[in-house]
Amino acid sequence: MEWDLSDLYAGPQDPRLEADLEEALRLTETLSPEALGQPEEAEALFRRYELALEKAYKPLNYASLYFATRTQDPEAKALLDRVRNRYTEVRNRLVPLEVALRKLPEAAFQALLEGPELADLRHFLLRQRAYAPHTLSEREEELLNLKGLVGRSAWSQFYTEYTGRFRFQVGGRELTEMEVRALRRDPDPAVRREAHRELYGKLMAEAPTLASVFNAVYLDYLQDLRLRGYRHPLEPVALRDEVEVRDIEALLEATREHYPLVEAYYRWKARRLGLPQVPSQDLLAPLRREKPKVPFEEARELVLTAFRRFSPRVEAIAREFFGRRWLDVYPRPGKRGGAFCSGGLPSTHPYILLNHTDDLDAAHTLAHELGHGVHFYLARKQRLLNFGASTPLAETASVFAEILLDDLLMERLSGEEKALLLAERVEDAINTLFRQVMYTFFERRSLEARREAALSPEAFHGLWQEEQAALYGDAVAWTELDQAAWAGIPHFVHYRFYTYSYALGYLVVLALYGRYREEGEAFVPKYLEVLEAGESSSPKEILARAGVELGSEAFFRYGFGVIRSWLEALP
């Protein structure tokens, strides 16, 4: 039930780890920007560039995974610090080539685009060119990379280590954060209230320290915006995700227009609970009389069955994760909370971290992360510079996998149980789409406020409560402790405006799922092609191959229409 990292390195002292870092540094010495002027030489140049990235990233990938299950281990922390420093050194040595590519004279750049030797890197080259207006001098880029070590990266690591030490007392037991969060879905109201009080009481008590972390990472981002000449806080996000700022704004506003769906659902839930409003402690309360137990072995078979019904190939890939120990399953002291899938490299494979709690939510998390895993696994057909998943597509396979699991469960249930699962599907839409947009509004408002001065914990509390009230209307009764929930959301520390991608990804999935329902088995190859494409084309181009027009009026209308139909089907 613990992952096996030996496919990367035998251990922290494996000499191959240091050798790879040394090889990465050596390769950077062979990367002459002058070769960009000759397309036939540029192909070999980019191959060496890719190899340098791979040799540097593989040790960082290992060190990050090793640390994720040992956040309180000094050896693991020292390894991550050392490798991160070496990785930054490699990245700094790559800056001259990257700056030269972005600022290449137009005629020379067009020659690279038109050269048959680099045909498979056309999208990569265009993406690099798009960053040209915001690329600084070589020395300035190096300094910004170094600033990141003591700026956002250092604060991100501190947040993980600091919150990783949090412990909670519920029912006489000492619990990790993920365990106490799971109890917010417990069938017993008394347990939910104790878990709520412990979790948010701790976040409230720690808010002064965590507010300092938020202020630091926000200031770091604001400095980057100014230094790179961005005019809008969403501009670097849009550039990264290959969308327009107006596309992100359209998503946010379209979602906010449909906030009444959220209030309508929680009014329905309040009636089911026999209450005038849903107490915040019961926001995640199960509607079933008994919380269904789903041991990991059962969750595994459910997910694999759901995958097999869609595509035997998808199931076969997912089975490798279990058979070859590419997962770390259960929570334990010192292990990072939450769940994630680390995509790795085309030459390696993904790894998945879980904190399984033997319930249906954990089964959905398994499906979600395995969806990511299948996505990265299939994208390995791309070369490194085209590998990965752009942000608009990053959550595609994960959320699609959860819906496949729900389809299986819906077929096995009837009557009241089926209605309750449908309600859970609506709640999932609220948490994956609407709530993530609420997070984005909170992040944008608090970031803008940070331009003027550092925010106090009370200022963060106020902004958070305002955004929650806008989303849920009068359907939920909040406690004072709920104001501190922002402090427990790591995305606000680790990334900028990533949460909007969950919302966009959810709508993408609904559009793809609609195609699947219409086309049946004929859709499966198109879907797998989307996953295999990696970042070889823009998200809009990749989705167009599957018949989805990203960001169109029909795109939004279809997605919100599906959610409305689920809500209207509730008894």
Image (cartoon, rainbow, N blue to C red):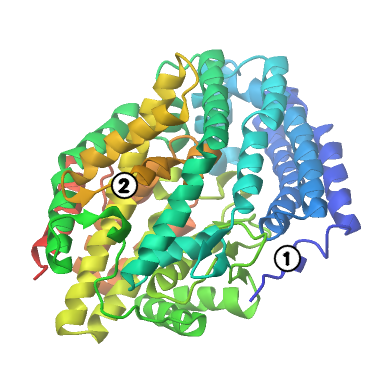
**Quadrant housing the C terminus:** bottom left
Residue at image mark 2 = 479
Image location (x, y in percent) of residue 378: 52, 62
Quarter of the figure with the N terminus: bottom right
Note whether residue 497 is visible: yes
Q: Position of residue 50 (x, y in %)?
A: 69, 43
Q: Residue at x 53, y 70 (%)?
A: 172
Q: Residue at x 57, y 24 (%)?
A: 220
**Amino acid, disc 1:** Leu
Circle 1 Cα neighbour tier, 10 Å, few/some/many (<14 / 14–19 / ≥20): some
Who comes first in sequence, dot 2 or dot 1?
1
Residue 259 located left or right of residue 208: left
Task: Tell me the crowding category of disc 2: few under 14, some 14 to 19, or many 20 or more residues within 10 angstroms, Cα based.
Answer: few
Q: Position of residue 158 (x, y in %)?
A: 66, 40
Left or right: 273 with respect to 201?
A: left
Q: Residue at x 48, y 80 (%)?
A: 300
In the image, residue 310 sits, relative to residue 219, either above or below, namely: below
